[in-house]
Image (cartoon, rainbow, N blue to C red):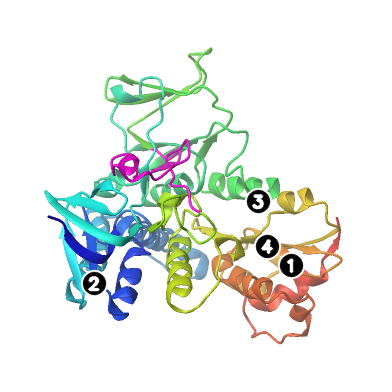
Amino acid sequence: MATRYDVIVIGTGQSGPPLASRMADEGLKIAVIERKRFGGTCVNVGCVPTKTLVASARAAYVARRAADFGVKIKGVKVDMRRVKARKDAIVNSGTRGIAKWMRSTDNVTVYKGHARFEGPKTVRVNGELLEAERIFINVGGRALVPDMRGIRDVPYLTNSTILDIDVLPEHLIVIGGSYIGLEFAQMYRRFGSRVTVVEMGDRLIGREDVDVSDAIREILEGEGITVRLKAECISAKMRGKKIVVGLDCADASKQVAGSHLLLAVGRVPNTDDLGLDKAGVTTDKRGFISVDDELKTNVPGIWAIGDCNGRGAFTHTSYNDYEIVAANLFDGGKRRVSDRISTYALFIDPPLGRAGLSEREARATGKRLLVGTLDMSSVGRARERSETLGFMKMVVDAESERILGAAMLGIEGDEVVQSILDLMYAGVSYKQIERAMYIHPTVMEYLPTLVGNLEPA
């Protein structure tokens, strides 16, 4: 005999809890299922812990540079146990907060355990069968462990397990030159480790424009990080206590040896053990649940929200999934995934803030473009803080005058880019920036200068 609910929410990442809460407010009876830790990737092994560690790493970096600002500090030591303890305290606070929220919400029943479908409207957890007309899958993803020669014969870390260590690696090898890998690379270099980044492609973060990739490499190498590109055939083996990573299967001399190995080569959805076949829910070849523009699966009454649907890999896209579903179910909305503008950040220091299309993507549209750049060394606040690395770039449709995209690599770039995002959603001319009065001294005040540098491209 199944226990009936109006709604079942599987997983408590960034979209599941607010959706459960909203539905409970609408008077529906909700079952929330969580098999591990409340809060999903972001709170436990993603944004919250990594940005907490980034903050500690930046504190060490700034302390070492104190003399540049006329401040004398005698020696800088990093206590990794205290660094980890600080991170753990912040993570645990978030996890407990979400658990308390769900357990104290009227009309919500929480189940701790692994959920598996037994049909399109039934889910079993801890031996109990639950039934609902609406089911929302919010199970997130995990680190991809590639089928790399020798990888099973060496100890390796992922973005999750590296958060458990409280020691400083003597030499950290990072396989993967994209967002997760580069954040950990700079972080541990600032803590005091030697760091080598190994990337199969011919440049870092290949989805970005070449000038952005090159500038990021320059920033990281400037801090002493070694970057090894074009490692098209990667292998791993032990040599004594060292982990040896081969970079070329045809040339054994091309290798790097380190004390620790971090795999940062992508993520896979947690969909392989949900019994989706019993519900008839389809996935793509990578395991992401196929959804339409309103996040509905092919099975009526089942939605997939968050990272597991392959329509976004960020906390903000997951939360936006919740907003789309809630608006369409309860507010008479007609919101669509395709209406949102891509935006994200790379949280190295200085950060990269991105909105909309890259210059390369914009050129592929065939539109007539205006492109403008401005070096951060021209920005007063950057000079005052002695943080002049990076540049701003804007791409505009010359005919409509609408902004197609922006890249802000530099101090406060992750914040500044969001003002550009607002203009893009508003659909107004880039010339609105020229007419605005910005606060001095800030990074934002140089946006009119950036716009003044727009030229046909």
For label 3, the SS is helix
Q: Mark 3 or mark 1, which has the lower sequence index?
A: 3
| Residue that label 4 marks | 406
In this figure, which residue is indicated by the disc labeled 2?
29
Q: Earlier in the sequence, mark 1 or mark 2?
A: 2
> Which residue is more in the foreground, 34 or 154?
34
Residue at screen point 47% across, 58% down = 295
Q: Are marks 3 and 4 in contact (CB under 8 Å)?
A: no
Q: Secondary structure at mark 4?
A: strand
Determine whether label 1 and label 4 are within 8 Å by CB: yes
Q: Residues within 10 Å of mark 1 (few under 14, many from 20)?
A: many
Extent of the magenta region: 263-291
How many residues crowd around disc 3 within 10 Å: few (fewer than 14), some, or many (20 or more)? many
Residue named by callout 3 = 212
The disc label shown at residue 403, or none: 1
Q: SS for tag 1?
A: strand
| Figure disc tally | 4
